Amino acid sequence: MARKGLFDLERHFAFYGAYHSNKVNILIHTLFVWPIFFTSLVLFYFTPSVCELIGTEPQCFLARRGLFLNFGFFFALIYAVAYVLMDVKAGSLAALLCMACWVTASSLARTLGFSLAWKVVLAAQLFCWTGQFIGHGVFEKRAPALLDNLAQAFLMAPFFVLLEVLQIVFKYEPYPGFHVSVNQKIEAEIKEWQEKQQKKMS
């Protein structure tokens, strides 16, 4: 069933899809979006935990395993909850991936240490972001969605590529008619953008 308002998956998907209609650009994003999310969590591991901020000893079950309720945890949790609220089935899978990324990124960050971790993250982020900008500039020939709506673009990117993979591999759609409706919205948005571009050039 289609959701409305803040968790309207159809609206969010159509917005992001209008900036990613080229197959090569979609492939590039499929390869690079989740690594960007993951490496961000590696760096966020070094932010203060709730226990540190309130001055309590981190002796809980998670802390003993190197998992802390820091910005990385809440960052992953926000994404996970938002995805479930948009679509229970695919959103639950996305939520599991988000939390798995948090656990794995925490382990990697702990192993590397800050002095090495930030260098690895920087290299990975530069590589992945460069690839995505090439995808937009060379293949999509349209500026990234983040230039028009930063928050929406960052939130939807991991879920968008996951839904694309689920649709291609398993023919999945959140509800009957989802892809037909979304494709119509995407085509209308692209047409509107092309008309605006033509007016600017004339």
Image (cartoon, grey):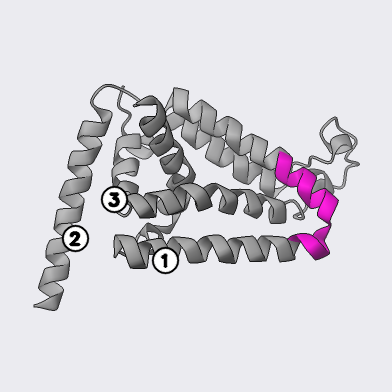
Predominant secondary structure in magenta?
A: helix
The location of residue 128, given as percent across then percent down, is 54, 60
User: Which three-letter amino acid code belongs to the residue tagged 2?
Assistant: Trp
- Residue at the bottom extreme? 202
Whether 8 is drawn above or below 15: the answer is above
Which of label 2 and label 3 is nearer to you? 3
For marks 1 and 3, give the CA distance.
15 Å
Q: Indicate which disc residue 21 carries.
A: 3
The location of residue 118, given as percent across then percent down, is 73, 63
Q: Which residues are magenta?
A: 104-117
User: Which three-letter amino acid code belongs to the residue tagged 3?
Assistant: Ser
Viewer-nearest residue: 191 or 23: 23
For marks 2 and 3, give the CA distance.
13 Å
Label 1 crowd (10 A; few <14 / some 14-19 / many >=20): some
Residue indicated by mark 2: 193
- Secondary structure of the residue carrying tag 1 is helix
Residue at screen point 36% across, 62% down: 136
Q: Indicate which disc residue 134 carries.
A: 1
Quarter of image, res 166? top left
Viewer-nearest residue: 41 or 34: 34
Indicate which disc, 1 or 2, sits on the residue closer to the N terminus.
1
Label 2 crowd (10 A; few <14 / some 14-19 / many >=20): some
Residue 161 relative to residue 185: left or right = right
Q: Indicate which disc residue 168 carries.
A: none
Indicate which disc, 2 or 3, sits on the residue closer to the N terminus.
3
Viewer-nearest residue: 18 or 49: 18
The location of residue 159, given as percent across then percent down, is 46, 40
